[in-house]
Image: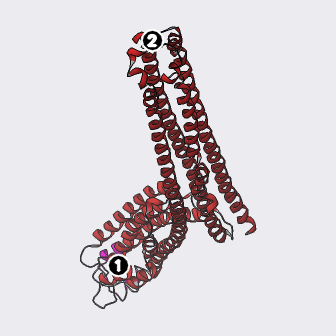
Amino acid sequence: MWSALLLSLGLFASGSRADLGLSFAIPNLVANVQAAIGQGIAPVTNANATIRVDVGADVSGALEAVVTVSNAINSSIGSVFQATQKAASEASVLPTVVFGNLYGTVIAAKLELEQAYGVVQQFQSTVSDRVYDAIVHNLTKLHDDLNVLTVNYIALGTAVNVVVATTILPITSLNVANIVTPALVADLTTTLKSLSTSVASLGSLFTEVVKQKTAAVTFVSSTNSTANAALTTLVKQLTNFTSTVVTAGDKLRQVASTLSSNVAAVHVPITGASVNYNGGNIVNLTQYLDAVVQSTQQLSQNLSNGYQDLQNNIQQVYAELVDVATREVYSVSLGLAQKAATSASSFVNNCYQKYNFLLQQPSLHVARLNTCLLPEADSFTKLQKLLDCLLVQFQSDASAITNTRLNTCTTLNGACSLTYFSAYADLALQTDAQLTLTNNVIATEARAITNRIRTCVVATVADINDNAQQILTNFNGCLVTGQ
């Protein structure tokens, strides 16, 4: 980039060229300045251009720091190089203007570099000590060399003033070196060369940082993608499970809601011909049937609430512990990247690749939590059968006093019939107790399902976390042993 820029400024040797605001050329000035600057800021801008990932994806902030510091160097040192190149062959303005521009450019460049120092601290905990120290050293050297460059400008400006003030002898390109000496030009080009060398070193360092952080972002992204795929599988299984819970709960409610109708139907021969029984007084029976309706409605509601609680509890357990597992794997992934970035081990690259690969293996996937749901696939069918069995017994008990039993009395309006009708009050208490017991049995089994799943999830997540931590431990060992 800079070679093209230098050519565009017309900095080539010519007999008609004039330098530093004078009316004639200073021997070797332009060529030596151009050679000293060399690639200019190209190494830094090239390093910046190698960033192929989203800078924001690098949680260490190192890539963002590379961009910020590179831009500062581009603006500051790049301006200094450009201004010096232009001044070396400047003939369109007076020397005072030429050197005034140079001084102003250096002052602005120093301010930009000083502002960049705050960003440099971002590298301290994200790259190796060697890289960090080298970055700080080269930036400090750039700043120091700008001070030296100012001294060089002053020395050259003083010599140029002497040239301008000399009237006794004509000054030309043939004798100007007696005043603007080769030593002055050499001092300038030495400083420019030092600036260029620091920029090249920073370019190399930034390229190393970009390569390392790009690999880290890629590995972390790959780990996240694998984890997300596993999570998608788990979510699908969990959705199927909760759908099963909802379906089972609906079926239980339907069974319970029809129960009172079934009991009422058994007693229709009495309620439909009430005048024939107990002198037409069947209040105890109707109150009993009302009590059955209330009890069965309560059972239906309790079963609904119980299954909703089961569903909510399972979803909460998964939401909390899946988050724990994914965070742990992600944390270890970042830990590997951080350790790899700051390690001076010669094994770091091989170890980093090896253990990042292991971090993506099935033993660390949250999809393992599917195994906590699959064994419970038949649990709700078993619960349904259990409820059916309990309710069959309940319906049988709740229909203990029917017209068949009443018809055993010699007369339907005597003491025998009255005794049976009086028993409905106790039967109401019995049926309510039976339905409460039925609900407790189902609720206990539902809690057992929840506890089994929760225990499995907690244990599996603990295993995932242990595996992740073991990978981090083994990675640290690998940095020492290479294994």
Q: In the depicted view, which residue is nearer to us: 105 or 77?
A: 77
User: Does 482 sit above or below residue 110?
Assistant: below
Q: Which mark is residue 264?
A: none
Q: Which residue, as the protein is rendered here, is positioned at the far front?
A: 410
User: Does 178 sit above or below residue 148?
Assistant: below
Mark 1 or 2, which is nearer the eye?
Answer: 2
- List the residue tagged with mark 1: 88
Spatial CA span between label 1 and label 2: 127 Å
Secondary-structure class at tag 2? helix
Task: Tell me, yes or no, if residue 158 can be seen here.
Answer: no
Q: Locate residue 300, reporting x and y percent.
A: 47, 31
Q: Locate residue 277, reporting x and y percent.
A: 43, 15
Amino acid of disc 1 = Ala
Q: Which mark is residue 278?
A: 2
Q: Is residue 166 magenta?
A: yes
User: Which of the 4 image quarters holds residue 320?
Assistant: top right
The magenta-colored residue range is: 160-178
Q: Locate residue 368, reporting x and y percent.
A: 60, 56
Q: Is residue 107 magenta?
A: no
- In the rendered structure, the answer to whether residue 63 lies left or right of residue 11 reads right
